[in-house]
Amino acid sequence: MDTFHSKVLIFGEYSLLYNSKALTMPLHQFKAKLNFSKSGQASKSSNASLRAFCRHIIKNHFPIDDQGNVINVQRFQLELDKGLYFESNIPQGFGLGSSGAIVAAIFMRYIDRAGEMKDLVKAETKENINKLKGILSSMEAYFHGTSSGIDPLSILLNKPLLYNNAKDVVPVDLPAEKAESEHVLFLLNTEIARNTGALVKRFKDSCENPTFKKVMEENLVAGNNACIESFLNADYDNLYRNLQLVCNFQFEHMNYLIPENLQGIMKNGLDSGDYFMKICGSGGGGFMLGFTADWEKTKAQLSDYPVEVIYRY
């Protein structure tokens, strides 16, 4: 069966909910696929979760587009009875697209006219990409209550994606990766799982306050968009300047999304300018995403924490 890799949202966490841009990239350190098993508690638990998802699809997704495409739930149910489960090393609740990978895998295995749909995926026209995003969004909403569709879309296409708005998502080239560069994008593992839906709700509730929403738009949304432009143009001086704005806003106004034991090192990076850390995905645990222009110095400062380089630019 097809293998699907994880992804990371480089920019756009939470601001994406309020009309900012977003940027994703594939993360090949983690992967997943559908498989069959006759035993094992993990596979039984996964099988039960897939059955619940199948029931949701039956209840909510006929048809899933205007061309008459539907998920072949008869085949899905038959294979569940044969021991189907989701084999994955993508950590759940850590912001790397574990639910998006499930959606992509189910979609590509059980969509009617799968061959035609795969051709649409390969074509990568704006119309096809946005059609896919809408379908995948409605499916992934099962896991989080709401979804932009960007996670399963990024995982399905296995390419960096630039989300300009809900109707404009395009593949994009990231700055060339440089094996020896000290400019590094890294992950720090908080080793804490989280509940995405509850965290997103709390942020949305905060945005009901007009004062908070205005400050958020002026700092988080504007800073995020400027980060994306600077990063894609390899303008790293402006990238770090705008990261200071985004990370400082998260530290001051969204600190409930930052584990208490990590708030000190996040503040140290902001104060020194040696590195910038922000939440990854919905925050509250999972991974944190870091940027630095001096990896050796940053690695020494964070030597007590589990960190991993994911991109050198």
Image: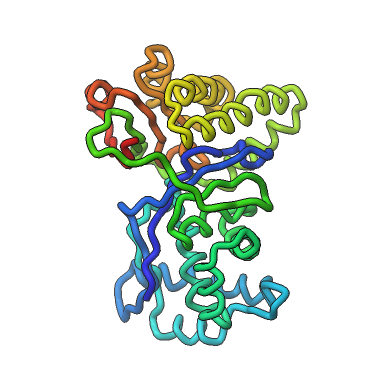
Residue 187 spot, x, y in % from top left: 35, 38
> Where residue 58 sits in the image (x, y, percent)?
64, 77
* Residue at position x 64%, y 38% in the image: 20
Determine whether 295 is above or below 137 in the image. Answer: above
Q: Is residue 88 left or right of residue 200?
A: left
Q: Can see residue 44? A: no
Observer-nearest of 73 and 294: 294
Residue in front for this viewpoint, 2 or 165: 165
Which residue shows up at 62% across the image and 44% down it?
A: 164
Q: How is the image coloured?
A: rainbow
Image coordinates of residue 123 in percent, x first then y, are 54, 67
Vertical order, 132 against 12 (above or below): below
Q: Is residue 178 above or below residue 96?
A: above
**Residue located 56% across and 58% down the image:** 143
- Name which quarter of the figure residue 274 lies in: top left
The extreme top residue here reads 271
The quadrant of the rendering that contains the C terminus is top left
- The spot of residue 35 in percent (x, y) is 36, 75
Q: Is residue 246 left or right of residue 2?
A: right
Quick check: 283 above or below 52?
above
Q: Residue 206 vs residue 290: left or right? A: right
Quarter of the view holding residue 14: top right
The N terminus, quarter of image: bottom left
Res. 150 visible in picture: yes
Along the line of sight, the residue nearer the viewer: 269 or 199? 269
Q: For the point 57% across and 40% down, which residue is it?
A: 199
